[in-house]
Amino acid sequence: MEDQTTSDNSLYIGIDAGMFKTSVCTSEGKKFTERSAVVVSTEGSNNQEQKVVSGKDALELEDGNIIELFKGELRTEEDIDACRKFLKSILEKHDVDASRDKYAILGTPSNASREYKRKFLELANEVFSGAMLVDELFCASYKNNLPDKSIIVDIGYSKTDISIIDSEVPRENDCLRLSCAGKDIDSEIVKLISERWEDSKVTEELASEWKEKYGRLVSAPDTCVVDVPLESGNVQESIIEELQLACEFVVTDIVSGIIKLISDIEPELREKLRNNIHILGGTSDLEGLDIFIENELKVLGGGKVICDIDPVYGISEGALEIAKNMPPEFWTQLNAENKNKEMIV
């Protein structure tokens, strides 16, 4: 569809509001990612002036109530206000033009509750001139123009979403959510290191850094020598075996989810699906991930795994494309109707 942004002065924004990181792309070419966390503190004695610290800066504060966001629930007014302030804060931090009309597509999980989506859309409409929620995996497939009958696998920090893409927004029975994801690899690394060194002081945060730098699922030259913090002092050792075992432990469960989804589909469609598997998400850049999954899929007759979607911006880029390609009158009408329509796809 033709880009509609050349004829107006509006700013279009695509957002992937993830539980670990939030990524944003704008029609003026900005791209940025922030940790999905915020601290709202009150300055002064009058309890009126608030200071908002977002992203990694919030996590580095020694005091303050750190609120981690986008966990699929908005139970209290405090939760809603924190999300609202977080979105405003990161836009301001990255100098997104506040003077222009801003229209946003926000990617949301397919199995998020209707109540969560309703509340999320309401707060988004307070931040933007107009907003719409779209299934996050549909956003990723839209940007990359994935073929019909594809499978898309989003391996995030705290969950993995697997969905069949068929030229339209995925239906509920086309989607599968798994609780195993990047954080479970981190936990397994900590466990395996502790089994090797009983006085290990390795944290999940440090394990995550090692995973991002050295994580792999294939044999490779041993270049993974790190400083392992122990109660008795640091030691320099290779942890390649622990890293590979931890990655395999979690990814094997993800493969089981892919196999289950394919096995529940009509037999005549299975071959096309297993040969069009696309991986994205913050944990999708493990070395050898595609080869490992393909080997595991031999029980179904093989498969083809393609890592062609940006692991960080795949969803937000797709959301931006949708926002830009909506007819200008759509956003104008939405704004004129005071955003009362429940724009959730």
Image (cartoon, rainbow, N blue to C red):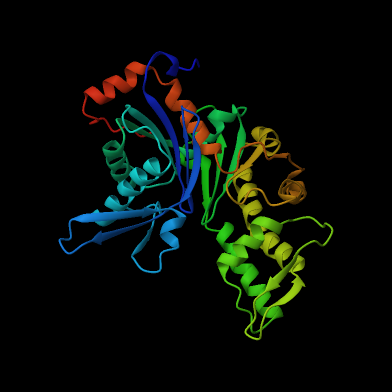
Snapshot quadrant of residue 129: top left
Residue 225 place in picture, x, y as percent? 76, 67
Q: Horizontally, is 240 left or right of 233 in the view?
A: right
The location of residue 99, given as percent across then percent down, is 31, 29
Residue 308 percent across, percent down from the top left: 66, 36
Query: Which residue does the image show at 65% across and 81% down from the upper left?
Result: 230
Q: In which quarter of the image is the C terminus?
A: top left
Residue 53, horizontal then vertical, whole percent: 36, 55
Occupied quadrant, residue 311: top right
Please tell me whether residue 324 is drawn above or below residue 239 in the rendered image.
above
Determine whether, in the image, residue 61 is placed left or right of residue 182.
left
**Front residue (pair 102, 304):** 102
The residue nearer to you, when weighing 72 against 242, is 242
Image-based side of 13 in relation to 336, left or right: right
Outermost right residue: 221
In the image, 333 versus 37, the foreground residue is 37
Q: Which residue is drawn at 63% across and 68% down?
A: 188
Residue 345 lies, with reference to residue 296, above or below; the image says above
- The image quarter in which residue 101 lies: top left
Nearer to us in this view, 149 or 24: 24
- Residue appearing at x 61%, y 31% in the figure: 149
**Residue at the outermost bottom position:** 232
Is 192 rendered above or below residue 209?
Answer: below
